[in-house]
Image: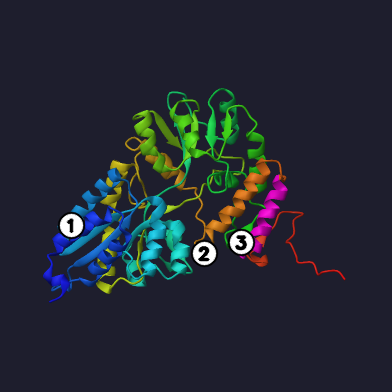
Amino acid sequence: MSICRSLPFASTLIYFHKVIYRHKTILLMVFLLGVSGCRSTPNNTGALSGHVILWHSWSPDEALVLEQALAEFRESNPQVTLVTLALPADDLLARFEQSANDGAGPDLLLGSTDWIGSLAGSGLIRPLNEAEIDALPLDSRATRLVEFQNNVYGIPLSLNPKALYFNQSLVDRPATTLDELLEYAADGQGVAFVPRFEAAYWGIQALGQGLFDPDGTLNLADSGFIDWLAWLKAAQNEPGVILNVDDQALRQLFIEGRIAYYIAPPEQQAALQQAMGEDTFGVTRLPRGPAGPAGPLLPAETALFYTFSSDQQVRTALALARFLANQQQSIRFMRELNRVPANRQVNVDPRIYPTVSGFARQANTAVILPNELDRDRFYAAGDRAYASALAGLLTPEEAVCRFGQEVVEAGLYSEDEIILPAGCSLLTDEPASN
């Protein structure tokens, strides 16, 4: 008799559930392998059945709301057994990569779109086929979020653009332009944000056309990047402006009411509400510049599918992901957790969800980077440009030139895929002189 038949599954599940939360990695792997080996065969091929493993990094309070949604899915699909595992956000990607490479990955992973390039490139997540895509409500934005090498990976659940938090007791009318932001800061309504590439990408588009041409060319000549670094370099010396890489310290300044504006993503809402109370802050779009609206980066939490799940597991995991992304569950997560729905069928009423509405409106002008891009190396090169320009080690022109040279040296873009600023040229290997 097999182990699967000789042991009651519920007892086995409870035992290993306890083991998991004692962080016994080896036993976790055994558990996952055991569950994978105990998949039941459905009697009714039209009904969903079997076991699906879902990993996420939601906090305990968030996980309670997720479990409420999963309970509804279980009720509608009684032959499905869902096993969930919450991991720390900083550990989730590495743990998934390790388990997936060992052949024991979860069927469904709730992770960032920033991970798609590396996971798809490693063959650890599967693309959706045409029939699966046709059954999904993916608009052009959602498709671009999860596209990699002309394939679609995953279903976006919620959006995470940075926007402008403001203290409602200190601000009557939030700043809408970069000039107003400096003016209000000088009048006592201070502003703070992290001056690095990913965190402060948003001003590039406000001062130019953005880093990318419609055909995907990295156009540093007309991007606004040089003007943005020049603006930051000048702004850091203006009264009421605090540019610092210690985001936790900046958040504390906002909590204490020592600054009026703070630039951060949606996930900061829970901590701010707990520390400051309800209705003490608002969220609005980042200030626009002379070239147009601000354009922060647009990562999103996405349901991703393990490559080596069985056909039955894939079918059930896909149904579960569609369920979590549907209109009703998106509203649940927005109402209970202030998550910004990726599903555009959801009406984010600013009278009911004022802070979520601020992020949703900001998402309309946010920038989606191509998933083919190596984010880590691209961001690192950008961080060096920000740091060197703000420290006065390089002029903004020199910093952007060096950024372009670095991304070509790293193989992120070829000479034909980049337009350098005026007066900048690619580095060449000079032949050794005799």
Residue carrying label 1: 14
Q: Which residues are magenta?
A: 396-411
Q: Secondary structure at mark 1?
A: helix
Say which residue label 3 marks: 217
Q: Quadrant of the C terminus?
A: bottom right
Residue type highlighted by circle 1: Ile
Q: How many marks?
A: 3
Crowdedness near tag 1: few (<14), some (14–19) or many (≥20) residues, C-alpha within 10 Å: few
Query: Around disc 3, counting alpha carbons within 10 Å, would you say few (fewer than 14), some (14 to 19), or many (20 or more)?
Result: some
- Kindly identify the amino acid type of the residue bearing the numbered disc 2: Glu
Label 1, label 3: how far apart the Cα atoms are: 53 Å
Front: mark 2 or 3: 2
CA gap between label 1 and label 2 equals: 41 Å
**Image point (68%, 51%), residue name:** 400
Per the picture, the main secondary structure of the magenta-coloured stretch is helix
Considering the numbered disc 2 on the image, is that residue within a helix, a strand or a loop?
Answer: loop
Residue 63, x across and y down, in percent: 28, 48
**Spatial CA span between label 2 and label 3:** 13 Å
Q: Which residue bears the numbered disc 2?
A: 372
First in residue order: circle 1 vs circle 2: 1
